[in-house]
Amino acid sequence: MSYLHYGHRCAVCLGDYQPEERLQQIPACCHTYHMECIDSWLANHITCPLCRLSLPPPPKVPSESQDGYRETVEESRAAVNSGEASVQLALGSCEESQHL
């Protein structure tokens, strides 16, 4: 899969992209980042690091009283910050929008 990105450098860490690295693209603006960098960024911000486009908030995690779920939003953020979880974004819309 090819990624459309601003140059060959991650706007979060300013490091160059390497072929073996995992990249993540924000579908709304098509900007691409190292997966670890954008996960860390989105744990504390609700905008694209490059163009500052407002992104939709993460889905709310049900409380314990709803269907027995025990995970909280804080636990989810801690998992992202510790590298135990990854922000997953859809990719199809950026590739399609480039052909319009």
Image (cartoon, helix red, strand yellow):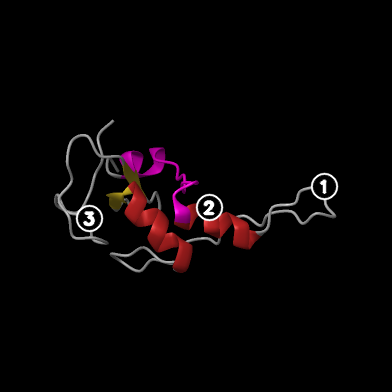
The residue that appears at 33% across and 55% down in the rendered structure is 37
Circle 1 sits on which residue?
A: 68
Tell me if residue 17 comes above or below residue 44 in the rendering.
above
Identify which amino acid the numbered label 2 is placed on. Answer: Ala
Q: Quadrant of residue 11?
A: bottom left
Q: Which residues are magenta?
A: 82-97
**Residue 55 magenta-drawn?**
no
Left or right, 95 with respect to 63, comes to left
Front position among marks 2 and 3 = 2
Please tell me whether mark 2 sits on a helix, a strand or a loop: helix
Q: Are marks 2 and 3 in contact (CB under 8 Å)?
A: no
Task: Indicate which disc, 1 or 3, sits on the residue closer to the N terminus.
Answer: 3
Mark 3: amino acid: Cys
Q: Residue at x 49, y 46 (%)?
A: 84
Q: Can you say whether 97 is above or below 60 in the image?
A: above
x%, y% of residue 47? 41, 66
User: Residue under circle 2?
Assistant: 79
From mark 2 to mark 1, how far is it between C-alphas? Answer: 20 Å
x and y, in percent, of residue 49 in the image: 32, 65
Q: Amino acid at mark 1?
A: Gly
- Is residue 9 or residue 75 the one in the foreground? 75
- Identify the mark at residue 10; answer none if there is no mark: 3
**Badge 1: residue crowd in 10 Å (few <14, some 14–19, many ≥20):** few
- Whole-angstrom CA distance, mark 1 to mark 3, is 40 Å
Q: Residue furthest front?
A: 82
Q: Quadrant of the N terminus?
A: top left
- Tell me the element at label 1: loop
* Image position, residue 60 (x, y; %): 66, 57
Please report the residue visible at 17 percent of the width from the left and 41 percent of the height from the top. Answer: 18
Residue 70 in sight: yes
Camera-near label (1 vs 3) is 1
